[in-house]
Image (tube, rainbow, N blue to C red):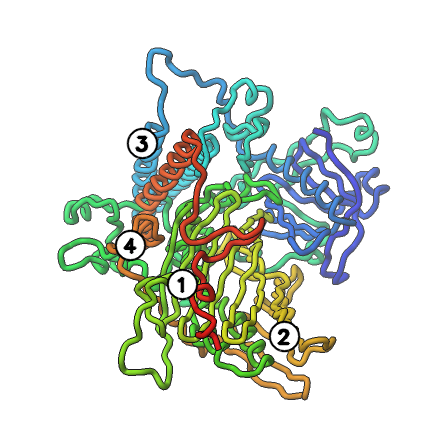
Amino acid sequence: MASMEGSLSKWTNVMKGWQYRWFVLDYNAGLLSYYTSREKMMRGVRRGCVRLKGAVIGIDDEDDSTFTITVDSKTFHFQARDREEREKWVGRLEDTILSHGFGYKSSSSLRLDAGKPVPTVQDFDRKLAEADAYLQILIDQTKALELRIEQMTDIDDKRRSEAIWNHANNMLEQVKHTIVLLQIAKNTAHPVNGTYQPISMANTSKEPNISGISLASGLDVGIEVGTDCLEQRIVHPPMIPVFNTGLAASHHRSLAPALNVPETSYSSSEEEDFYDANDSSEFCSPAISPEGTKTEPLELNTNVSPSATSEVPEEPWRGPTSAGNRSTNFLRPDGTLDYDALYEDPEESGLSMESQGSVVTHLLSQVKIGMDLTKVVLPTFILERRSLLEMYADYFAHPEMFTRIADLESEKERMVQVVKWYLASYHAGRKSSVAKKPYNPVLGEVFQCYWDVVEPSQASTPEPVVSDGPVPWCRRDQLSFVAEQVSHHPPISAFYAEHYNKKISFCAHVWTKSKFLGLSIGVHHIGKGIVDVLKYREQYIVTFPSGYGRSILTVPWIELGGSVKISCEKTGYHADIEFITKPFYGGKKHRITADVFAPTDKKPFLSIVGEWNGIMDAKWNDGRTEQFINVHNLNIQRKNVRPIEQQKENESRRLWKEVTAGLRLNNITSATNAKSEIEQRQRDEAQRRKDQGITWETKLFLPEGTDQWIFARPLISRLSTSVIR
C-alpha cells in the first residue's frame, strides 16, 4: 500500500494551540513523521515522529476534524481540515497499525485429517475450556515464582529467576492473545443471534491473513492487531533503515529519504507536545484504588485452588474463596446459592482494563474506527451484573420525584418537575465508578419490578392490586415498571411505568447504536419517551443523551453527551438540555446546561448549570438563584423484584443468574460458559424460526407506525373517562 503525505495541524503547548506541520505516513516503516514544511521534508529535516506499532487511534464523535494517536505513553493530538480529510488519514493510519501488529501463519496451511469427523462448535468450546484451564495453571505457577523471587537472597539466583519470570509472562500474554483470537474467530463464523456462515478458504487465501482472520472475506469481524507499546517489559528492535518500497511513482518522487525507525515516538522539543497528563499516567501505570492501594488483576479465568475444591462441592457457580470474596456469603441454610442476594449485593469489582494486561487492548486494537459494535462480542469480565432492561428501571430510582409531577397544579410547575425528575435520574444508573457494560437483552427478555411510594396521608388498609397492569401483583399506590426486548436487529428495548392512583405513566423505546471511537466507545440512544399526566391530558416527550465509555484502555469511566429536548405540545412549555462531554483540552467532566421556556417565549424563565452526577444550580428570570438538585442528598430507592425462583424463564434475573453468579464470585470461566449457553440458545431459536417461517411476536409491547413501540395495555386505555377528572 502506498504511503501518504499532506498537511495537518498538531497541538503544541508552547504555542498553546495548533501549528501547521507537513506529515508523511510510511506504511512499510510503520511511522508517521512530521516536518515544519514540505521543503524541510524534502531535505530530510524531521521535526518528530509517531511510532505506529501498537498505537491506538481516537476520535471525538462530536468533533468533525480532530483525532488522536496514543502510543509510547503519550497522546498526540491532530486536526484535519474537515471530516473527509480526517477519515482519509484515520483509515490509512489504521491500515498501517494493522500491518505492523502480530503476524500469524495463514489458516490455509492447516489441513483436516479426512479420516476423522469434522470438529463441531462444541468440540471447539471444550478445547478452548482446556486451554483456559492450562492458562490458569500457568498464571498460578508464574505468581508462585514471583512470590518465591521476593524471598530470594542470593543475587545470582534471583537474577536467573527473574529472567525466567519475564519469559513466562511474555508467554502468558501470547497464550491470552491466542485464546481471545480463537474466541473471536468462533463468534465471527457463528454470530450470537444469527445462523452459521461458512468462511470460504478460497476467498481468504487471496489476501494477506492477519492474526489468522481474513479481513478480505467480507465478514464484519472488527479485528485488527496491535498494543506492543503497552507492554511493561517490551524489548524494542534496534534502529534500522527502512526504505519505501512498492509505492506509486508519484509518491516515489515526493516522499522523504529513507528513515530510521526510532525506538519510541519523539519530538525535537518534547515539552511543546500536548498530551493529557492524566490519560498518559493511567495508560502506563497500575490502577490505584481510592484507598491508595493497587488494584489486583482479575485473571481471564480464575478457578478454585486444589485445596479449596477438596473442601467445597463442585458447582458451576463456585468461585474463589478468598477472604474478601467468599461464596458462602451467598449460601442459603440448605447450601444452595441465593441468586437474589447476588443481584442485590451492591459490591462491584473495581476492575480496570489495565488489569487484564494486553488482552483488552488487543481486542480493542482490532476494531475499526467508527465501526458499529452491536455484533462485537466483548470479554465477559467487563460486564455489569444486570441486564440493560434492568438498568432502564433506574430512571425511576427516585419514584416520588416522578409521581410528584401529577400532584402539581400549574403547567409551569409540572414542566419544571419533569425536568427535575429527568436530570436526577441518570446518576442512579451508575452502580460502579468503573464503566461496565450491562448484559445485552435477548429477544423476548422481560424485566418487572415496582417501588413503594410513601404518601403522608397514606391509608392504613392496603390498596388493591392492579391485576391488569404491567406488574399484576403491584398495588395501586406503588409505581410499577416493565421492560421487554422487542427487537434484536436493530436492538430495541421498550419499557413502561405507571402509578395507578396518581394517574401518571411513562412509555419509551430506545434503540442502542454503538460506535468504536478509538480510545472511547460511543452509544447513541435513538428513540423517545412520553410522560403521560392523565389528569391534565398532558404528554411530555423526552429524548435521550448518548453515552460514552472513556479511557477504555485503563480505568473506564462513563460520560453523557448530546442535546436533549423535553416538550409538551398541549401547554407549549419546552426545555433544551445539553450534556457536555469533556473536551480534549482540559475542562470538567459531567457538565450539563438546561434552559426551560414558557410558550412563545424566546428567553428561558429558568436556566440550570452543574453536573448530572453532582450538584445542579438554578437561576430564574427574576434573578433568584438556588440549588436545583443535589444528587448526593437523594436516596436511591431500592426496587422490588420478585424472587428468581418465581420468575419465568425469560425474565432478566433468572435468565442471566449463572452469569451474574460467575461474575460476583469471580469465576469468569463459569460466567463465560453460562453466557455462551444463552447465546447458543438464541442462535438455535433464530434458526428454528427461520426454518419454520415464523415471525417473532412481542408479548407486552406493540409497534405503532414505523419507529415507535407502545405498551399493549396502557393506563389511559384501562381507565374510564369518569375516573380521569
Seen from the viewer's position, the closer of residues 486 and 422 is 486
Which of the labelled discs sits on residue 571, or is there none? 2
Looking at the image, which residue is at 56% across and 39% down?
Answer: 236
Residue type, label 2: Thr
Expressed as whole percent of the image width and height from the top left, the position of residue 137 reads 30, 39
Measured Cα–Cα span from mark 2 to mark 1: 27 Å
Q: Is residue 125 visible?
A: yes
Label 1 element class = strand
Measured Cα–Cα span from mark 4 to mark 2: 42 Å
In the image, which is nearer the foreground, mark 2 or mark 1?
A: 2
Q: Is residue 160 visible?
A: no
Residue type, label 4: Gln
Measured Cα–Cα span from mark 4 to mark 1: 15 Å
Expressed as whole percent of the image width and height from the top left, the position of residue 295 reads 40, 58
Do the residues under discs 4 and 2 have CB atoms within 8 angstroms?
no
Residue 117, above or below 615: above
In the image, which is nearer the foreground, mark 4 or mark 3?
A: 4
Sequence-first tag of 1 and 3: 3
